Amino acid sequence: MAEAQWGPHMTSFRTLLAGAGLASTLMASTALAQSGEPIKVGVLHSLSGTMAISETTLKDAMLMLVEEQNKKGGVLGRPLEAVVVDPASDWPLFAEKARELIEGEGVDVVFGCWTSVSRKSVLPVFEELNSLLFYPVQYEGEESQRNVFYTGAAPNQQAIPAVDYLMEQESVERWVLAGTDYVYPRTTNKILEAYLIDKGVAPEDIMINYTPFGHSDWQTIVSDIKTFGSAGKKTAVVSTINGDANVPFYKELGNQGIAATDIPVVAFSVGEEELAGLDTAPLVGHLAAWNYFMSVDTPENDVFINAWLDFIGDDDRVTNDPMEAHYIGFNMWVQAVEKAGTTDVDAVIDGIVGVTVPNLTGGMSEMLPNHHITKPVLVGEIQDDGQFSVVWETEGLVPGDAWSDFLPESAPLIADWTDPINCGNFNTVTESCGGVTN
Amino acid sequence: MTPLRRWFAATLLLMLPVCTAAQTPSEDAFAALVGALPDASFAEVETLVGRMAATGDPRARAVLEALGAGALHRLKSNDAVVIVRNVAGDDHAVDALTGDSYGAIPRRGSTAIRVNNSLRRAVSAAVGIVTLRDPDPATRLGAARAAFRAPDPAQSDALAAARRAEQDPRVREALSEALARATLQDDTASVDDRLSAIGVIAARGDGTALGVLTPLVQAADPQIAAAAGTAVDRIERSRARWAMAQNVWFGLSLGSVLLLAAIGLAITFGVMGVINMAHGELVMLGAYTTFFVQNIIRTSFPGLFDWSLLIAAPLAFLVAGAVGVAIERGCVRFLYGRPLETLLATWGVSLILQQSVRSVFGPNNREVGNPSWMSGALEIGQMTVTYNRLWILVFALAVFAVLLVVMRRTPIGLQMRAVTQNRAMAANMGIRTGWVDAMTFGLGAGIAGLAGVALSQIDNVSPNLGQSYIVDSFMVVVFGGAGNLWGTLAGAFSIGIANKFLEPYAGAVLAKIVVLVAIILFIQKRPRGLFAVKGRAVDA
């Protein structure tokens, strides 16, 4: 999702943090009474640098999941041990740290990455060393790799349903697609533009705008949006603006007096964590589309939130969508390992397809042959307490689609990692593997 | 909506008028409407809202306002509809109908009745109808504006009656506009009525008027289409004229942010020649000081919130200044004359500061609120001037003026200039050069802290705050001419305005690149920047 121009390099701090994380988890696992060699679980999230803002929470969520599983007796009668490393928001370092986890520490599975560029950077490592990666963040799609499991949303599980909601419920006719200038917004907006034109929206009713990372001066763009919205047609903004730039964007919206009842903004990268830095009173009614909201009222979610607040020891902390993705992915892996009776990578890859685990919104998510999962799509409106209230959801779960049907070059492609296809980019027209290179 | 729910909704809506007719006391009908809210779909709630307003029940306003604010809940314990208020961190529930208090309720002890944007519009229109005759003119103005936003021909008579009774000219004007918009929505209105309505809307002359009138250009009646067309043309021409002024304002505002970020660096880098990569982190410390001050004010002295920035400013100056002195004494003073080492050392310091803040305050954004006098915007003609940016511009110029006075008119300023121009001579005259170095660096750092107070109002307060400003700051100082404060001022504003004039044509990404390339070319031509410091001292 989010990426940044540079990442700091601070070896001493990084090692210190990684060491501290390792030491604390070692102590936690030795205190328990399981027998046998521990199963090592790698956690590859940035704890320093620009992405620490989002990824630190996911590291904590993983530590909590491991601790809870150990309380339940571990996996295969063996305790789990989390191995935390800090790739410091530095993309090449992600590949190095992934190698260190798999070769050096001998972990059986890795949960990690946030930005698409960090995921792309570790892909060759996981392929070469044949290990497992669970990737928990919504992303642009157009990818499926044998060793990677995508537990976040593909575009058809977030962007397309959100646009449908605006079109049907708010009768939006004019669209601003605003995003940060990198691969996720550009691909998502390409898919959305094709989809809107397909739905009969005139090209002059679509305005596309890109801004640099960490953009803080939104005056011109917000005033452009205001002008674009005064053509007598209901206008909405579809925002793929990255985490850090959102705060000044929403502040400018509020100050220039754009209320959600006039021009609603639906965001794909703004969750409970991002709103924590904002006074949300002027933003009430702006929307976000996710597969999970903290406000969802189910017994599973209550249990998860209470466990999280107890673990972190701070009642003001929030839960968010990527945390739920880790919750689902972790439970899927546990179940696949129990089913296979071993942590062997090939056995888990074969066994995990078709595994079903409860998600936190009251449904059962299934791992699909394309290594994506089924999820519900929820549209929520921002409330003045920084939470979202769900105003719409899909009936049933939506299966994740690795290759978008709305882009001509990827429409004929499918991914299926079961026999006989066993391919991440199978072209259904030529019936051969290797549709496009990625 | 499932067929069953649709059937239920239809029955409910059919039955309600019967209930109203059967039970003469209207409060029972109101109670029935309120009781139906929790299980209704959005569309059904919208109908119920209209009916609640129509009952004229005195409790309608409070219930509707709570519904619009998302504060109308259903208690899980006994299904009562309650209004929830946050009192000192706890949720307190009051029965929506009887006003009985349930006291504090547990977290997740109630379910909010959900509202979406179209429902929120309906609620504000309904509140508008209820409050059109309110004794307070401000409430009546709000009611008229709500009616304008949700035009409904069925309310035309109520609006016309309210306008006849209205004494306040502003409310009268707002009511006329609301009435005109409702007339334009009314298919049965005569052409003359519609033409005069177009006139009323066109007189607004803003973007909203444009939004109302543009669809009418395609109207079937040629007279209406022509009138709307003329009005739209006129508004668009005046907008084009104002666009220039708006761009200049945006440029000045961006320039003031750049000036604030760079002005501290103009001292440490410009005057002292220290390449201080930790400058951005000093700005960040100022922003976190603001957060810290606001936190204390929020918990202990909520009445002082509007003063929080004024209280934070001197503290931020002291905190950042003290850290600056510590950096100078502990690190930079051993490296004078070795720019490369200084660069690396201060960069290291910047990372240490960043990670320390991350460890103490956490990696997440921290919320710094806008005081009331910095929220909202001022409309000047077709131009929007947001108050927070207006005050930041004023603040930047004030800081600049004070700094200029300190450097030119005070003994410490004189000593600073003397030491940087000729260290050996200054030492011979009895100036404690080491002490002056520390004070100069501390002054630059303190001003960076002041910048942090202002930037906390428009940017996110996170450990990464400083990183986004460090490159821009160096750009401004180098472009303006190191060692010259006026150069920094001119540099900041010309970069800001150039950026804002390029942005509409080139887009935000390209505009930044073009400005950067232009500055590089300019520096090739004039290596000392816009306002070069002349004299022998420069080459020493």
Image: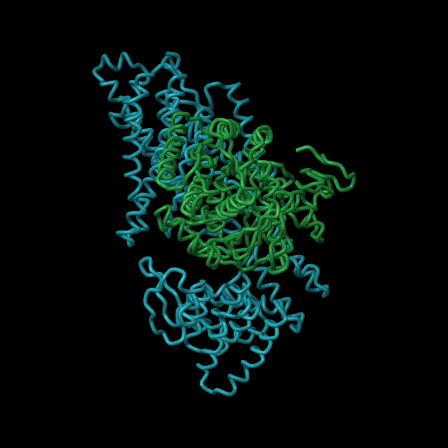
Chain colours: A green, B cyan
Look at the image and tell me in which quarter the C terminus of chain A lies: top right
Q: Residue A302 at x, y = what percent?
A: 43, 56
Name the one closer to the observer, B347 or A322: A322
- Vertical order, A379 against A97 (above or below): below
Q: Quadrant of residue A429?
A: top right
Q: Residue A198 at x, y = what percent?
A: 72, 50
**In the displayed structure, does residue B6 sit left or right of residue A324?**
right
Q: Residue A416 at x, y = what percent?
A: 67, 42
Q: Quadrant of residue B533?
A: top left
At 51% across and 21% down in the image, what residue appears?
A: B523
Q: Residue A46 at x, y = what percent?
A: 46, 35
At 51% across and 68% down in the image, what residue appears?
A: B125
- Vertical order, B132 against B389 (above or below): below
* Total numbered labels placed on residues in the image: 0
Is residue A154 at all visible to an observer of this figure? Answer: yes
- Vertical order, A192 against A97 (above or below): below
**In the displayed structure, does residue B71 sit left or right of residue B299?**
right
At 47% across and 51% down in the image, what residue appears?
A: A254
Name the one closer to the observer, B76 or B335: B76
Is residue A241 at all visible to an observer of this figure? Answer: no
